[in-house]
Image (tube, helix red, strand yellow):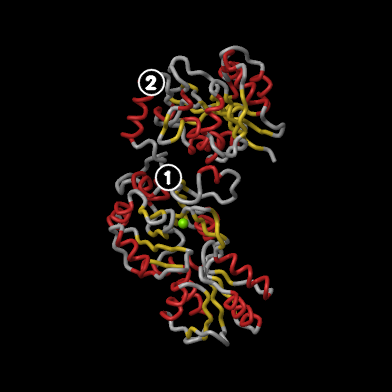
Amino acid sequence: MDSIAAIILAAGASARFGRPKHLLDWDGRPLIAHVTDTALSAGLSPVVVVLGHQGRKGLAVLGNRPIRAVTNWRWQQGISTSVQTGLAALSPDTRAALFLQCDQPLVTRDLVQALVARFDETQAPIVCPTYDGEYRSPVLFAARLFAELADIRGDVGGKAVMRRHPDEIATVQVSDPSVLADVDTPAEYDALRARAAAANLQAPRLPSGILNCTRHLIIDMDGVLWQGDAPLPGLQEFFAFLHQRKITYILATNNSSRTPDQYAAKLAQFGVDILPDHILTSSEATATYLETIAPVGARVYPVGEEGVRHALIRHGFTVCEADAEYVVVGWDRQLTWDELAAASLMIHNGAAFIGTNPDTSFPTEHGPVPGNGAQLAAIEITTGVRPIIIGKPEPWMYQEAMRRMGASTTGTAVIGDRLDTDIAGGVRLGLTTILVLSGIAQEADLIGSKVRPDLVVPDIRTLVQSWPSSTDKEIGD
Ligand SMILES: [Mg+2]
């Protein structure tokens, strides 16, 4: 498949700066990692990182990001050698390459995607941002100019090729020049960081249209509101913001083990008062689904922890140990072979098979352990019957959340930390999707992912900071 690559130029010694710029801290990451993550989250592939001076250190800070790292041993001969090294790492089916510098930390995913979109739209062999009539970096070059780029010598970059093709340059107009500012000296670096912090430019600039239209939110909890037993930053302010803006919400979790009251109690410990009715577990959602297909008082065999049993009883079902018409399976950390056997036999005898959620594994500090999906698989293999799944990414739970809020697809957004459940479920229903990077998914997971959230933010605190004020007509474009 043809692709648009990123070539990140990080080989130089940064002589004017006095130390390698690509290792400077930017918002908790070295600049080289920050720029790499921007390229990855924009969907560029492959992302080639050209290292040279202190290359090993550069490689170490990139961790296990899915990149192609190459070393320019001739880095002292100028930037042209890095361009050549980067191009040599591309496969022949590459359509174009965007050259990113490590010293432009405010270049955003949105700008990168706008450059790619402009390329797709115009087919111009050169695309770059422009401000005040001046061509700026980062520049995208189509494959047909790669040979010319590889011919440049000395400390000259793509500008030489741009000068030869003045009529073949398409541009993306940038309204805020600070997005393109580069770091040449320690003083500039400090100034840019201070400016970014003051103007909150490190936060993504969110499309105001989408968020201004959002009246209802379906919010995942673990990895979004808290991590383990610790609240995530900005939790109280997040709910204060929702109340102030009169945005209704449902907290929705695939975790079937606890009851809504238990989640409300957990939030109360973090200083947030939520009515249990605003909390929808996959057990609760399963009980509401059963209400639509089963008569009142129907016999249900529950596998699962307190949350499953509690929801079934609350919705008027008869919880039983034998002869059930319905088998509901949720995550159960005390699961026994006898229970698996009982569930299997009842399903074999004609009971409907319903799973609260499909999560195959559950993350722990030691690694993944079996989740409800693994339990469901055991019963499915035994019986040959596929379960009806209620939790994300299946539609029922989000639909139930919308019913509770009186919401429709338009104006409803989901917030979650998992691409395969939270975001995929929202995409299926045509909801606005917001991925936070405070839980499971990281920016690098977006590369190659078929599931694309509408917005990606570090956490809920940044989301609130970036949300357009109620009087803003148009910002962030
Ligand atoms: Mg989560």
| Residue 155: image location, x then y, percent | 56, 13
Q: Residue furthest right?
A: 92
Residue for point 37% across, 35% down: 201
| Residue 330: image location, x then y, percent | 52, 71
Q: Considering only vertical position in the picture, is 30 above or below 321?
A: above
For residue 235, the mark is none
Tell me if mark 1 has few (under 14), some (14-19) or many (20+) residues whose alpha carbon lies within 10 angstroms of its own.
Answer: some
Q: Check disc 1 and report the residue beneath it.
A: 458
Q: Considering only vertical position in the picture, is 372 above or below 108?
A: below
Question: Which corner quadrant holds the N terminus?
Answer: top right
Tell me if mark 2 has few (under 14), some (14-19) or many (20+) residues whose alpha carbon lies within 10 angstroms of its own.
Answer: some
Classify residue 266 by image quadrant.
Answer: bottom left
* Residue situated in front as seen by the camera: 123 or 206: 206
Q: Check disc 2 and report the residue beneath it.
A: 186
Q: Is residue 275 left or right of residue 78?
A: left
| Residue 300: image location, x then y, percent | 52, 82
Residue for point 46% across, 25% down: 103
Q: Is residue 430 visible?
A: no
Q: Which mark sits nearer the N-terminus, 1 or 2?
A: 2
* Residue situated in front as seen by the camera: 286 or 119: 286
Secondary structure found at label 2: helix
Secondary structure found at label 1: loop
Residue for point 57% across, 77% down: 339
* Residue situated in front as seen by the camera: 436 or 138: 436
Give the Cα distance between marks 1 and 2: 27 Å
| Residue 343: image location, x then y, percent | 59, 78
Question: Which corner quadrant holds the C terminus?
Answer: top left
Amino acid type for the residue under numbered disc 1: Pro
Residue for point 62% across, 13% down: 153
